[in-house]
Image (tube, rainbow, N blue to C red):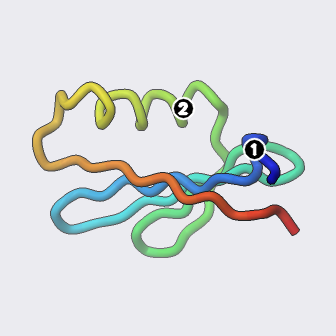
C-alpha cells in the first residue's frame, strides 16, 4: 500500500460547494467547485485544511480518500 502524499485526495465541503486537492508529479493541485484546476503550494493547502480540522468554521467538513497513484 502506497501512503505517500500523491496517494490521497482531500475534499473540503461547505454547504454549497466542494473543493478537491491532490498531488501530482509536479506539486499540489486544487480543483474548484466549477471544475477549474489551479496549482497550489503545500502552504496554501494547509491554509485551507487546518481551519476545517480545527473546527473554526462550523459548516466546513473535510474528507480524505486513499487512491493508488497511476
Q: Quadrant of the C terminus?
A: bottom right
Disc 2 crowd, CA 10 A, few/some/many (<14, 14-19, 20+): few
Q: Quadrant of residue 24?
A: bottom right
Viewer-nearest residue: 33 or 1: 1
On the rendered structure, is 11 left or right of 40? left
**For residue 46, which numbered disc appears in the image?**
none
Disc 1 crowd, CA 10 A, few/some/many (<14, 14-19, 20+): few
Residue at coordinates 36% horizontally, 64% vertically from top-left?
18
On the rendered structure, is 28 left or right of 18? right
Residue at coordinates 29% horizontally, 66% vertically from top-left?
17
Residue at coordinates 86% horizontally, 46% vertically from top-left?
26
Query: Is residue 18 placed above or below 54 in the rendered structure?
Result: below
On the rendered structure, is 55 left or right of 17? left
Viewer-nearest residue: 16 or 37: 16
Q: Are marks 2 and 1 in contact (CB under 8 Å)?
A: no
Q: Can you name the residue that lies furthest to the front here? A: 1
On the rendered structure, is 42 left or right of 2? left
Residue that badge 1 annotates: 3
Q: Helix, strand, or loop for circle 1?
A: loop
Query: Is residue 14 placed above or below 41 in the rendered structure?
Result: below
Spot occupied by residue 27 in the image (x, y as percentages of width and height): 78, 43
In space, the residues marked 2 and 1 are separated at their CA atoms by 21 Å
Query: Is residue 41 placed above or below 33 in the rendered structure?
Result: above
Q: Earlier in the sequence, mark 2 or mark 1?
A: 1
**For residue 44, which numbered disc appears in the image?**
2
Q: Helix, strand, or loop for circle 2?
A: helix
Residue at coordinates 73% horizontally, 41% vertically from top-left?
5
Q: Quadrant of residue 56?
A: top left
Spot occupied by residue 65 in the image (x, y as percentages of width and height): 55, 59
Amino acid at each position: 500500500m502506497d501512503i505517500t502524499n500523491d496517494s490521497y485526495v482531500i475534499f473540503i465541503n461547505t454547504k454549497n460547494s466542494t473543493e478537491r486537492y491532490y498531488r501530482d508529479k509536479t506539486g499540489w493541485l486544487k480543483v474548484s467547485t466549477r471544475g477549474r484546476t489551479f496549482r497550489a503550494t503545500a502552504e496554501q493547502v494547509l491554509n485551507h485544511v487546518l481551519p476545517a480540522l480545527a473546527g473554526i468554521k462550523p459548516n466546513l467538513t473535510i474528507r480524505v480518500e486513499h487512491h493508488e497513484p497511476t
